[in-house]
Image: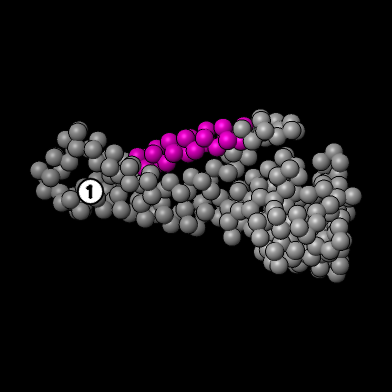
Amino acid sequence: MPGISAVGTLARYFSLRFFIAMLAMFLICCILIFFVDFIEMLRRAGNYSGDVPGLLLAWMTLLRLPSFSELTLPFAVLIGSIGIFLMLSRSSELVVLRAAGISVWQFTLPAMIVAFLIGIGFVLVYNPLAAVARGEAERLYAVAFGKDESLLKTNKNAGAWLREDGTDGPSVVHAAEVLNQGLELNGVTVFQYDRDHGLTERIEAKRAVLKDGRWELEDAWVSAVGQEPALYQRYLLSTYLTPSQVRDSLGT
C-alpha cells in the first residue's frame, strides 16, 4: 500500500540520518580521546630512560582507544540525537512532517531502534574486541617500558600484566586472577623473550606460585619457537622479583 510504503521510506530515511549523526559524534569523541591519550603516552615515554618508538606509542594508543571510547557511547547517542533533531527542525522537515499528519512517534521511533541496535552491537562485538585490544596494549606497554613499570593493573575482565626480568631473559606474564597478595596467579600466560626482545616461547599454565627467585607453573603448555607444544606438570620460570616487590606493585 502507498501509505505503508511511504512510512517505511520515512523510517529508513530517519534511521540513516540518526545513525550518521551518532556515528559522527562517536568518531569525534574517539579522535579527542586518541590525542589526549597519545599525549599522555608521549609524557610517559619522555620520563622513561629507554627509547620507545613513536609508532609503537601510537599503536598502543590505538589499541587502548576502544576500551576508553566505549564509555562515550551514551554521550554520543544523546548529543547525536539532539543534533539531528535540531538540524531537522531548522530545515523545517519536522514542520512538514507534522503538517502531513506524521506523529511524533513515527519519526522518533527510528532513533530509538538505531540506538538499541547500536547498544546490542557494542555489547556483543565491540566490548569483547575492546578487551582483547586493551590486553594487547598492556602487553606491549610492559615490553616497551621495561621493569620500571613492572605491573599494570587493569579491570577484572582484563586481569593483570607483569613485566619482569630473569636469568632466562625478559618475560611478560598475564594472569586472569591474582591471589594471596600476588604470590599466586591463576590462568597464566607467559611470553618469554631473549635479550634482543625476540619471542622465544609462549607458556599457558593453570597456576603459578612465586618461590625463591622463580615462578613455579603447574600444568604448563610450553610452545617454543620452531617446536611442537609440550605439556609439563611443573615448569620453572626465573624471576628477580621478590614477594615484597610483588605486593608493593599490586598495592596489597
Above or below, 57 relative to 214: above
Colouring used for the render: one colour
Magenta span includes 172: no
The spot of residue 37 in percent (x, y) is 55, 37
Magenta span includes 23: yes
Q: Residue at x 72, y 40 (%)?
A: 145
The spot of residue 58 in percent (x, y) is 61, 34
For numbered disc 1, what is the local secondary structure? helix
Q: Which residues are magenta?
A: 20-42
Residue type at mark 1: give it.
Answer: Phe
Q: Quadrant of the C terminus?
A: bottom right
Q: Residue at x 86, y 41 (%)?
A: 195
Q: Residue at x 43, y 36 (%)?
A: 28
Q: Is most of the magenta stretch helix, strand or loop?
A: helix
Residue of label 1: 107
The spot of residue 95 in percent (x, y) is 13, 40
